[in-house]
Image (spheres, grey):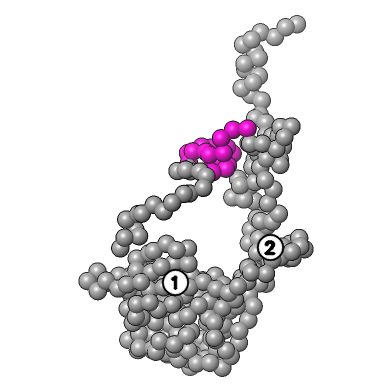
Amino acid sequence: HRRSPNSLFKASQTCPTMGKYVQAQRKGKSPVFKAHVRTRKGAVKLRPIDYAEKHGYIRGVIKEIIHDPGRGAPVAKVQFLNAYRYKRDTELLIATEGMYTGQFIYCGKKATLDVGNVLPLRSVPEGTIVCNVEAHVGDRGSFARGSGCFAVVVSHDEEKGTTRLRLPSGGKKTVPSDVRAQIGVVAGGGRTDKPLLKAGRAYHKYAVKRNCWPKIRGVAKNPVEHPHGGGNHQHIGMPSTVAKDRPSGRKVGLIGARRTGRLRGVKKTAQDKD
């Protein structure tokens, strides 16, 4: 017998929607994409801020420089004497170019301006190259932490108590002048100059980071797996731009793009003028 149009409408309401979750959605909840941390050496941070750093300085010695799997920059294991108990504190700092084992490094307001030392930006002259800069006082390092990265102290505003930095991205940022930074360039620079050349090296590079390789293009997938999938030729078949408020399964491509294509000419912004 023929089904009435009404019953067909009800059936279409009850049947599950077709298609798979796109990979970007699965990354949110699946344990498959968690970071691979078993072999990591620990969180790499500046010392917790204390009385010694705020008013004077404290000396540490570099015990060894080690490789941290999944990180491009080497890590320095630095030992400090505990100011309050009879013990030594070991901290993991980002190694800067020129560090060596047995070197003394100094942390604090009155430390000298030498490579590897940790100083508040207030004590650093303009034009100094710094790395592992804090965003807020006491957060123990936020900016310019990747291998070969550095930030430049552009200017100090004494009245507001702020300092302007040029970050590795080329952007400028204003931070409080009391935030700390290491002096120098992060070690391990030029890492990307040598090409990986073969898939096996890329496989091992990302195996210690997280499951983010190989990346399959949306147009190479089937329609069930990606909005850009399917078709007799690999083509997107719709605008590549997509609004910021689209549902997460459709939110692929150039999200919230102000413009696409090649930028021609230099547009002056208010940020560049100061």
Query: Observer-nearest residue: 68 or 35?
Result: 68
Mark yes or no: residue 159 visible. yes
Occupied quadrant, residue 111: bottom left
Question: Amino acid type of disc 1?
Answer: Ala
Mark yes or no: residue 92 visible. no
The image position of residue 139, as x and y in percent, is 42, 71
Residue bearing mark 1? 151
How many angstroms separate mark 2 from mark 1 (CA)?
Answer: 27 Å
**Which mark, by number, is residue 70?**
none
The image position of residue 240, as x and y in percent, is 57, 39
* Secondary structure under the numbered disc 1 in the rendered image: strand
For the C terminus, the quadrant is bottom left
Q: Residue furthest left?
A: 159
| Residue in the image at 63% along x and 58% along y | 34
| Residue in the image at 66% along x and 36% along y | 235
For the N terminus, the quadrant is top right
| Residue in the image at 39% along x and 82% along y | 119
In the image, residue 249 lies in the stretch drawn in magenta = yes
The image position of residue 263, as x and y in percent, is 48, 49
* Secondary structure under the numbered disc 2 in the rendered image: helix
Question: Amino acid type of disc 2?
Answer: Tyr
Residue bearing mark 2? 206
In the image, residue 254 lies in the stretch drawn in magenta = yes
The image position of residue 5, as x and y in percent, is 64, 10
Number of numbered discs visible in the structure rendering: 2
Q: Which residues are magenta?
A: 237-255
27, above or below 50, in the image: above
23, above or below 134, in the image: above
Q: Is residue 9 left or right of residue 172?
A: right
Query: Observer-nearest residue: 188 or 4?
Result: 188
